[in-house]
Amino acid sequence: MLINLDLESDEPIYTQLKHQIIAGIAKGLLKPGDGLPSVRSMAADIGINLHTVNKAYQQLKQEGFILIHRQKGVVVNPDGVQQADEEYRSKLIKTLHPLIAESLCRGMNEDEFLQLCSRLFKEFS
């Protein structure tokens, strides 16, 4: 899986890395049980600080996307990602609410917003 980071972006590098790994899992490029490079190796491969990679990996671990074993290294969660529950849906609503509000303020209507969401969903099919 190729990682492309925008070092000029306002989005923190660890967040970009985390999102790209999640996208890789969603697209099936990374499958349950697949290994990821060690923190040190990933940092060297993409030319970023190892603490940045560590922060992304720790967040992915907390959210259940990866497991970090002392002997096996970093692997995509072999059991798969926990399915959406009420806690996740609540978090999703809190994330979407301001995005929808901003979209309305910028003149987008519901159909435009839903078409954009649909187009993005298709990227993962």
Image: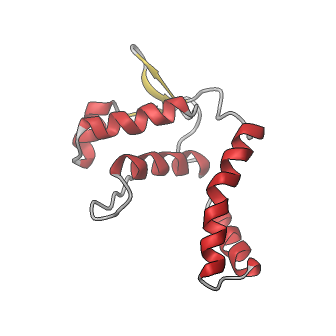
Decide which of 83, 42 is in the foreground and name it: 83
Q: Quadrant of residue 122?
A: bottom right
Residue beneath the point at 32% across and 62% down: 6
In front: 59, or 69? 59
Does residue 77 appear to the left or right of 6 in the view shown? right
> At x 50% / y 30%, what residue is drawn?
61
Residue 53 versus residue 100: which sits nearer the camera?
Answer: 100
Counting labels gives 0
Residue in the picture at 26% in, 32% down: 40
Question: Can I make out residue 1 in this image?
Answer: no
Quarter of the picture holding the C terminus:
bottom right
Percent coordinates x, y for residue 69 in the rendering: 44, 18
**Where is 11 relative to 73, above or below?**
below
Indicate the quadrant where residue 56 lies: top left
> Outermost residue, bottom direction?
107
Q: In the picture shown, does residue 19 fall above or below 80?
A: below
x then y, percent, for residue 52: 30, 40
- Residue extending furthest toward the top: 71
Placement of 46 over or under 37, stated as above or below? below
Q: Does the image show residue 70?
A: yes
Among the 4 quarters of the image, the one containing residue 114: bottom right
